[in-house]
C-alpha cells in the first residue's frame, strides 16, 4: 500500500528558509579577512543568498554548473553554500592548502565555471594564471574599497559586494530534485590523486539532521557553534547546514586559527560548541595552559579527522569541556561514528571512561558499519578482532565525480574506508590504523595510533608520529618521531621508558627520533608518507 504523505524534497534551500523565518535575528559572527569582526543574522543571510543566486545565474551559470570557492569560514562562504546549492548549482569547496598543481588539477577536473576567492588566496590564483580551465570570472569576496587591481593572465575579477548590491532579493528557490548535487569536495589526496565526492541535497539535509542529535553535536537554538574545521574540509563537518537547521548562533573564525584568536572570539561570543582536528586543539590547549585562560561558556568540542589522543580528552575534560570523539571521511559527508557514553557507563571510573572516550565512537543512525576479515567474513564484535571497516548509508558516496563507472564501493553496496578497526558488543569502533599505516612486525600488527597516543601523554611531548621502518628480521618495526614542547628536554631513552608498562614490550619502538617539526597534510593530519621518506630509510635505521 502506497502511503499518503507529502513528497516534499529535502533541499538545502529549505534549511536557510527555515532559519530566516523562525530564527531571523539569530547572529552569525565572522572574523573577516579584512580584519574587523562582522555581524549579520539568518534573515539577512537569506536575503543576501537570494541576491547572490541571481548574480551567479546572471554570469551564465546553468543547473549543475560548479562554483569553486577558495575561502575561510565566514558569512560570505555560507552565502555561497546556499546560493549555489539552492539555485541548482554545485558549491565546490577547494582546500587552499593543497599543492598549487593539485588545486589547478581539481579546478580543471571539476570544470568550475566561476571561482569565488577570499583576498588571502589571490596570490595563489595569480600563480595559477593560464591554468584555470573553464573559469570565466573570479569573484573576490570583498567590497569595492578592498578590491585589488586586475592581475594579468587571470579571468576578470568581480567584486562580491557589488554583485550583490546590483541584484534584487526576490529570488524564489527552485523546487529541485533532492537527489541532484549541491556540493563537491575532493579528498585531500593523502592516498593518491584527489577524487571528487558529490553531495546531494538529500544527503546534506539528512546528514545535518544527524549532526544535531544529542549524542552527536547536541545542537539547538540555545547553542553557539563555532566551526574551527574549515568549510573546505568536508563542509566543516556539516555545521553550515546543521546550525541554521536548529537556529544555533554561528561564530566563524575566518583565517585566524591560533589558540589566542580562537579563545578571544569564543569568549566574546559565548561559544558553547566547537569542532576541529586534534592539531588545532593542541594549539588551543597549549595557549590555555600558558595563559591560565578559562574556557568560558564552551562545554563541548567535537574532535576528529585523525585520532584524538586520550590525553587531549583528559585535559579538555579537566577544564569542564566534554569531548566528542568522532570519525569520518570526505566520502561519508563526513560523520559516521560519534562517541557518546550510554546510560550504563555512568558508573565507570575515570580511567575506564577515558578509555571509552578515546574510541572513535558508535555508528550514527544513517551510517551502517561492518568489519570484514581478509576472507570477507564479519569479524566478531569483541573489541579485539580487527579487519577492514566498511560503511553504507544515504550520505556515503557511491562513486567519485567523473569516475562514475568505477563505483566507490568494493563489496556490493559497501564503501571500503581504508581503515582497520575493531568493534565491541556495544557498537563502539576503535580505529587501529589506516590500512597503509599499520605496522606489520613478525606477522603481528602494531597500531601506530596507539603508540602515538602513549607518546603524547608524556608532558614534554608536543606531537608524535609512528611509522613503519623496514626491518630485516621482523619485516617492519615501529619508528617513533617526536616533537618536544618548547623549552622541554628529553632524550630517546626517557621517551622509551615512558612506554614501559603501558604497552606490550614488543610494541615499544627501539628507534626514536626527536625532531623540530613534523610534516602535515592540507587538513592538518600527519603526513605519514613523507615521514617515512624522511626518517624510515633502512640504511639509517639498522636493526638493533
Ligand atoms: P583523506 O582521506 O584524503 O585524508 P579525509 O579527511 O576524508 O581525507 O580522511 C578520512 C580518514 O581520516 C579516515 O579514513 C581515517 O583514517 C581518518 N580519521 C578520521 N577521523 C578519525 C578519528 N577520529 N580517528 C582516527 N582516524 C580518523
Image (cartoon, helix red, strand yellow):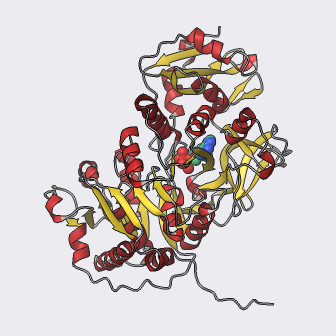
Q: Position of residue 123 (x, y in %)?
A: 24, 48
Q: Is residue 202 above or below residue 416?
A: below
Q: Return the residue nearer the eye: 118 or 112.
A: 118
Q: Does residue 99 appear anywhere in the picture? A: no
Q: Is residue 453 above or below residue 105?
A: above
Left or right of residue 59, residue 204 in this image:
right
Left or right of residue 133, residue 272 in this image:
right
Q: Position of residue 318 (x, y in %)?
A: 59, 36
Residue 413: image quadrant is bottom right
Q: Position of residue 98 (x, y in %)?
A: 40, 45
Image quadrant for the N terminus? bottom right
Q: Is residue 308 above or below residue 407?
A: above
Q: Is residue 60 above or below residue 305?
A: below
Left or right of residue 291, residue 145 in this image:
left
Ligand 1 visible in quadrant: top right
Q: Position of residue 435 (x, y in %)?
A: 66, 39
Residue 29: image quadrant is bottom left
Amino acid at each position: 500500500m502506497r502511503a499518503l504523505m507529502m513528497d516534499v524534497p529535502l533541499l538545502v534551500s529549505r534549511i536557510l528558509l527555515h532559519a530566516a523565518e523562525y530564527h531571523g535575528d539569530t547572529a552569525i559572527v565572522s572574523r573577516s579577512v579584512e580584519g574587523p569582526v562582522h555581524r549579520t543574522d539568518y534573515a539577512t543571510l537569506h536575503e543576501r543568498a537570494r541576491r547572490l543566486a541571481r548574480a551567479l545565474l546572471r554570469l551564465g551559470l546553468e543547473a549543475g554548473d560548479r562554483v569553486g570557492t577558495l575561502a575561510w569560514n565566514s558569512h560570505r562562504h555560507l552565502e555561497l553554500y546556499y546560493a549555489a546549492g539552492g539555485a541548482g548549482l554545485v558549491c565546490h569547496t577547494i582546500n587552499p592548502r593543497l599543492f598549487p598543481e593539485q588545486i589547478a588539477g581539481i579546478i580543471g577536473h571539476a570544470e568550475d565555471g566561476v571561482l569565488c576567492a577570499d583576498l588571502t588566496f589571490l596570490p595563489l590564483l595569480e600563480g595559477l594564471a593560464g591554468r584555470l580551465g573553464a573559469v570565466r570570472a573570479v569573484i573576490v569576496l570583498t567590497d569595492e574599497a578592498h578590491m585589488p587591481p586586475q592581475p594579468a593572465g587571470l579571468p576578470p575579477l568581480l567584486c562580491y559586494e557589488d554583485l550583490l548590491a546590483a541584484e534584487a532579493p526576490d529570488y524564489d528557490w527552485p523546487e529541485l530534485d533532492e537527489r541532484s548535487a549541491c556540493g563537491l569536495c575532493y579528498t585531500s589526496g593523502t592516498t593518491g590523486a584527489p577524487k571528487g565526492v558529490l553531495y546531494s541535497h538529500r544527503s546534506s539535509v539528512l546528514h545535518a539532521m544527524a549532526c544535531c542529535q544529542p549524542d552527536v553535536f547536541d545542537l539547538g537554538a540555545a547553542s553557539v557553534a563555532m566551526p574551527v574545521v574549515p568549510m573546505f574540509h568536508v563542509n566543516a563537518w556539516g555545521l553550515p547546514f546543521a546550525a541554521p537547521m536548529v537556529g544555533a548562533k554561528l561564530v566563524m573564525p575566518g583565517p585566524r586559527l591560533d589558540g589566542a584568536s580562537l579563545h578571544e572570539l569564543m569568549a566574546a561570543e559565548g561559544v558553547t560548541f566547537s569542532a576541529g582536528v586534534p592539531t588545532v586543539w593542541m594549539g588551543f590547549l597549549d595557549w590555555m595552559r600558558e595563559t591560565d585562560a578559562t574556557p568560558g561558556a564552551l562545554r563541548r568540542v567535537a574532535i576528529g579527522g585523525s585520532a584524538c589522543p586520550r590525553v587531549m580528552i583528559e585535559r579538555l575534560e579537566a577544564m569542564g569541556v566534554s569531548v566528542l570523539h568522532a570519525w569520518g571521511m570526505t566520502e561519508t559527508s563526513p560523520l559516521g561514528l560519534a562517541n557518546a557514553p550510554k546510560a550504563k557507563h555512568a558508573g565507570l571510573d575515570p580511567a575506564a571512561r577515558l578509555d571509552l572516550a578515546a574510541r572513535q565512537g558508535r555508528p550514527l543512525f544513517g551510517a551502517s558499519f561492518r568489519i570484514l576479515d581478509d576472507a570477507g567474513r564479519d569479524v566478531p564484535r569483541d573489541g579485539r578482532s580487527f579487519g577492514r571497516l566498511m560503511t553504507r548509508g544515504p550520505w556515503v558516496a557511491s562513486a567519485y565525480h567523473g569516475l562514475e563507472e568505477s563505483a566507490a564501493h568494493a563489496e556490493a553496496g559497501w564503501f571500503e574506508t581504508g581503515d582497520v578497526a575493531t568493534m565491541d558488543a556495544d557498537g563502539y569502533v576503535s580505529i587501529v590504523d589506516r590500512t597503509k599505516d599499520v605496522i606489520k612486525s613478525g606477522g603481528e600488527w602494531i597500531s601506530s595510533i596507539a603508540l602515538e597516543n602513549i607518546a603524547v601523554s608524556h608532558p614534554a611531548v608536543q606531537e608524535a608520529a609512528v611509522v613503519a621502518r623496514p626491518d630485516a628480521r621482523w619485516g617492519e618495526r615501529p619508528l617513533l618521531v617526536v616533537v618536544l614542547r618548547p623549552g622541554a628536554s628529553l632524550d630517546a631513552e626517557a621517551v622509551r621508558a615512558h612506554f614501559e608498562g603501558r604497552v606490550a614490550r614488543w610494541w615499544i619502538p627501539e628507534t626514536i627520533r626527536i625532531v623540530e617539526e613534523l610534516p602535515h597534510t592540507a587538513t592538518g593530519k600527519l603526513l605519514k608518507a613523507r615521514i617515512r621518506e624522511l626518517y624510515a630509510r633502512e640504511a639509517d635505521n639498522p636493526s638493533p
